[in-house]
Amino acid sequence: MGAADGSAPGALRQALARAQRRRQWRAFSLTLPLLLFLLLTLLLPIAALLLRAVENPEVARALPGTMRALDGWDRRDAPPAAAYAALVRDLADLPDSADAGALARRLNSEVPGARSMVMGAYRSRPFAGSDEAIRQRLLQADPRWGQAPLWRAIAKNGARWTPDYLLAALDLQRDAQGRIERMPEDQRAFVGILLRTFQISLVVTLCCLLLGYPLAWWLAALPARSANVLMILVLVPFWTSVLVRVAAWIVLLQSEGLVNRALIGLGLVAEPLALLFNRTGVVIAMVHILLPFMILPLYSVMKNVPPSYLRAAVSLGSPPWAAFLRVYVPQTYPGIGAGALLVFILALGYYITPALLGGADDQMLSYYIARYTNVDVNWGMACALSALLLLATLLLYGVYRRIGKEQPIH
């Protein structure tokens, strides 16, 4: 009887453990479709993007014999005749012109004019005769084959993996010997574009905070029915296409648009202001689009701040503005941080608004990502810039998390 009584608690614990495991597996099975969806639509594409930023398959796949012939070349003058013959044989072995086109585009991104040289040699293949005879045929077809720059580009890109795209995204490059150095000053662009992207995003975030904070505070102070009605107006931008909103701002901000006519009619300006195709138009439209992302986190935090705190501070002798800044505002820091981070990260990736409302000096990094993808068809460079933008976003989020942990809100 005693043994049976002693085994009862153990059996009960085992039954509870089995029930707990079943509940855990049931919960996991319910979230499994979402996890698979995120894996297929988010994590795998990001991993492929990061992989493509360092992948360099075009030259290694198309010119294996040429790479063996260039092994040991000092990369100073033109290579030996065996490299010319190997190049012609490799071009002759390509399955179709699409592979030659991919090779030509890759080399042309480093050496201007390489596309015509490679495609000309591809169309003229095959050459017969000795290595020296093939070399002479290539030089007769295009004397630039006797120069070292294109051969250096071929030798440098012979490996399947390369840091060149990531280095170029930071305005760096490898020289003929493989050493990392800064690009010439007239070729440095992407660091400045990244800084411009951060600058525009910061200005938009500050404008959204200055406009959204008092509006969120007002909404939080209103009765629930009035706040819900006005919140619908705040959410209207969510229900409208970004392209439609940008088109509306083009109509409003043009020289004969409603804004300039109103300013001239009120006597505030004598002639139309330049509000379109510049930084001003970009900031105005982005603030309008992203303002709800600032208001909603602020409103959710402000609704949970008891109004009695502010009244108590005033009743204890604090001036209203001092009580607001010292008592109320610190309690809304989580909303400020969440809204600012959300707006800033969303602004970093904006493409349509700067492309339609900005000028040449107002384009953000996403514009060049799209250009390399759709126009230049340089996936490696597009993925490297995307990786740079992703890294900047993750670093920004990490800094925000670090500051949030170091300065807890009580």
Image (cartoon, rainbow, N blue to C red):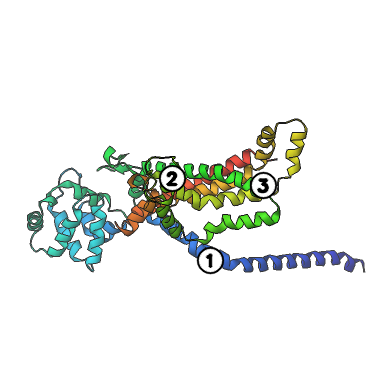
| C-alpha span from label 2 to label 3 | 39 Å
Residue under the image location 37 percent in, 45 percent down:
278
Query: Which element type, helix, strand or loop, lies under badge 1?
Result: helix
Looking at the image, tell me whether mark 1 or mark 3 is earlier in sequence order.
Answer: 1
Q: Are marks 2 and 3 in contact (CB under 8 Å)?
A: no
Residue type at mark 3 is Met
Is 396 on the left-hand or right-hand side of 100? right
Q: Where is residue 87 in the image (x, y as percent from the top left)?
A: 18, 58
Q: Which of 267 and 52 is in front in this view?
A: 267
Q: Nearer the viewer, residue 243 or 149?
A: 243
Q: Which mark is residue 265?
A: 2
Looking at the image, tell me whether mark 2 or mark 1 is earlier in sequence order.
Answer: 1
Toward which corner of the image does residue 94 lie, by quadrant? bottom left
Query: Which element type, helix, strand or loop, lies under badge 3?
Result: helix
| C-alpha span from label 1 to label 3 | 34 Å
Is 205 on the left-hand or right-hand side of 372? right
Is 107 on the left-hand or right-hand side of 216? left
Q: Nearer the viewer, mark 2 or mark 3?
A: 2
Q: Residue 37 carries which label?
A: 1
Q: In which quarter of the image is the C terminus?
A: top right
Q: Residue 302 carries which label?
A: 3
Q: Position of residue 393 (x, y in %)?
A: 48, 48
Structural crowding at the residue carrying mark 2, measured as other residues with C-alpha within 10 Å and reported as few (<14), some (14–19) or many (≥20)? few
Structural crowding at the residue carrying mark 3, measured as other residues with C-alpha within 10 Å and reported as few (<14), some (14–19) or many (≥20)? many
Structural crowding at the residue carrying mark 1, measured as other residues with C-alpha within 10 Å and reported as few (<14), some (14–19) or many (≥20)? few
| C-alpha span from label 2 to label 1 | 55 Å
Q: Are marks 1 and 3 in contact (CB under 8 Å)?
A: no
Q: Residue 68 carries which label?
A: none
Is residue 89 placed above or below 259 in the rendered structure? below
Furthest toward the right, the residue is 1
